Amino acid sequence: MVKTALVVGASGIVGSATANLLLEQGWQVYGLARRPTQQEGIIPVSANLQDAVETAKALADVRPEAVFISTWARQESEAENIRVNSAMVRNLLDGLSLGKSTRHVALVTGLKHYLGPFEAYGKGTLPQTPFREEQGRLDVENFYYAQEDEVFAASKRDGFSWSVHRPHTVIGQAVGNAMNMGTTLAVYATICRETGRPFRFPGSAAQWNGLTDMTDANLLAKHLLWAAQTPEAKNEDFNVVNGDIFRWSWMWGRIAEWFGIEAAPFDGTVTPLAEQMEHDAEIWNKISTRENLAEPDLNRLASPWHTDADLGRPIEVVTDMGKSRRLGFKEYQPTDDAFFALFETLRKNRLIP
C-alpha cells in the first residue's frame, strides 16, 4: 500500500527536500502552501493556514499518514510570531483531525529553541554548548514553544505520535525563502566578483574563530523520515546537524575559492550584509539580465538579515547529535560539500552565473 504524506511548506528549503525524498521512497505526497508552485510529482494543496475555515476545507479530502511541518510566517514582534504561527499549526491539525488518518506529525523548528527569539537572540542566560535536548526551554516567550504546544495538544487529542526537529542554519535551495544563508552568500560572492568589492566576513569574531555546525536540507529530510518510521524516535525532540564542525575562518576561504575570488582578511569588525548589500538590487538586476538568470529580484534570493543574525552571534554555537546517534540515525554530510552542492544547483537552475 502506498504511504501518503502531507508536507507543509513544500516549496521551501526544508519542505522541497523532504517532498523529493518522500517521492523517491515511493510515497504519495501532498504539498501545502498558500500559493503552491508547480513541483513534479507533488499534489498541490492551496490554503492560508491563518484561516481555520479555509484550511479545513482545503484538507477535507487529504488523508495523510505522516505530516511534516516546515513553514512559518515572520511577524514584527515575538508576540505576533506566537499568535500567528501557533494558530497556523492549530488550524492545520484541527483540519486534519476530521479525517482521522494522521499517525505521525513532525515539526521543524531550530536552535532559537536554545538561543531565544529574534527579539532576545543570543542574549541573557543561555544553555551551555554544545546544545543538548535535555536542556529544555528558556524562560522566555518563543513561537517555537507555542508551535510545539499545539502539536502536543493535538497529539493528545487525536492519538498520533510526534517528533520535533531542531536544525542549525539550513543549507538548501528555495526562492523567496526568509532564511537562506547558502543562497545569500552565493549572491554576495557573485556581486563581489562582479564589482571587485572585498568578500568580507560580515559577522563577529566569536563566529569567525569559534566552532560551529550547520544542517544540510537533504540530511534534515532523511532525519524527518527516519523519525516518522522509527518507533524509538516517536514523541521525542532532536537536534539535527551535519555531523562535522568547522570555523568560519576556514569555511570563508573555501567559499571564496569556489567563486574564484579572494577572501578579505578579517579584522574583527562586524560589517553586516544588510548594510553591504543595501544598494545591490540594481547590480543584481544587471547581472541577471546579462547572464539570462531566472530570478532578477535580489530580495527573492538573498536574506541578509537572517545571515547577519547567525554570523553576528557573540557566542560559539555547536550542537550535540548524541540522542539521534544512540537511536540509530547515522547520516553525515560535510558542510563544505553541502555548500558546493548548493552552488552547483543554483548555477544549474540559472539562479547564479
Image (tube, rainbow, N blue to C red):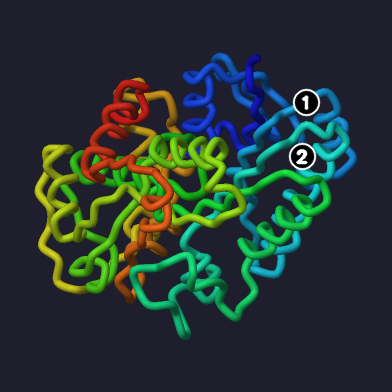
Secondary-structure class at tag 2: loop
Is disc 2 in contact with disc 1, using a CB cutoff of under 8 Å?
no
Q: Residue at x 47, y 19 (%)?
A: 24
**Around disc 1, counting alpha carbons within 10 Å, would you say few (fewer than 14), some (14 to 19), or many (20 or more)?**
some
Q: Residue at x 36, y 71 (%)?
A: 313
x, y (%) of residue 218? Answer: 40, 35
Q: Is residue 300 left or right of residue 31?
A: left
Total numbered badges shown on the rendered structure? 2
Q: Which residue is mark 2?
A: 48
Is residue 100 among what the camera can see? Answer: yes
Q: Nearer the viewer, residue 247 or 305?
A: 247
Q: Residue at x 28, y 41 (%)?
A: 333
Q: Which residue is mark 1?
A: 62
Q: Residue at x 53, y 47 (%)?
A: 232
**Disc nearest the viewer among 2 and 1:** 1
Q: Nearer the viewer, residue 52 or 105?
A: 105
x, y (%) of residue 75? Answer: 65, 59
**Quadrant of res 144:** bottom right
Mark 2 residue type: Asn
